Image (spheres, grey):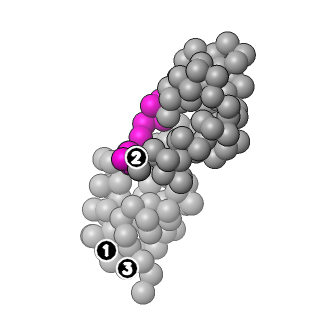
Amino acid sequence: MFKTIADPADCEVSSVIRFLNANNVKQAGIHRQLVDIYGENVMTDGMVRKWVRQYNDGRTNVHDEARSGRPSVVNDGLVEKVNEKIRESRQFTIRMLCDEFPQISKTVLHQNVTNRLNYRKR
């Protein structure tokens, strides 16, 4: 039995895919080996096929490509400011926080208050 590696870097997994693909290991075999070493949640069979297809098409970079999208405005400093504001008044509402922090959407504020700061409605 193999030793399991927990929480591998994405580039590590894609490097293994590239290596095994270069050794002519079939896609299903690559996926099976990844699961054996990294565990069930490492990557889906479909994602392995996508990486193999890209390497066969000439890709050499093992890192994910940068994606366009809206950059997050939430950072640790801002989370700490929200947390301080909550501690000032335990009778807060998400709407009050939205007024105080207009750069953060209501949805993101709610997610951060419930998930990241572990505040729950009682």
Q: In which quarter of the image is residue 49?
A: top right
Residues at circles 3 and 2 in contact by the CB criterion of under 8 Å: no
Is 38 rendered above or below residue 115?
above
The local crowd at label 3, few if under 14, some if 14 to 19, many if 20 or more residues have their Cα within 10 Å, is: few
Q: What stretch is highlighted in magenta?
A: 3-12
Up-down relation of residue 62 to residue 72 (above or below)? above
Mark 1–mark 2 distance (CA, rounded to whole Å) = 53 Å
Main structural element of the magenta stretch: helix, strand or loop? loop
Under circle 1, the secondary element is loop
Can you say whether 52 is above or below 42 in the image?
Answer: above
Considering depth in this image, is 2 or 70 the residue closer to the camera?
2
Q: Is mark 3 on a helix, strand or loop?
A: loop
Residue 67 badge: none
Tell me the crowding category of disc 1: few under 14, some 14 to 19, or many 20 or more residues within 10 angstroms, Cα based. few
Label at residue 2 = 2
The earlier-in-sequence mark between 1 and 2 is 2
Residue 91 — which label?
3
In this view of the protein, which residue sits in the foreground, 122 or 100? 122
Give amino acid for label 1. Answer: Ser
x 64%, y 22%: residue: 24
The x and y percentages for residue 95 are: 51, 68
| Residue 65, horizontal then vertical, whole percent | 58, 25
Residue 119 visible to the viewer = yes
At 46% across and 46% down in the image, what residue appears? 38
* Of 100 and 84, the residue lying toward us: 84
The answer for how far apart the CA atoms under marks 1 and 3 are is: 5 Å
Q: Which of marks 3 and 2 is nearer the N terminus?
A: 2
Image location of residue 32, percent across then percent down: 59, 44
Check disc 1 and report the residue beneath it: 89
At x 67% / y 27%, what residue is drawn?
52
Q: Do the residues labelled 1 and 3 touch (CB within 8 Å)?
A: yes
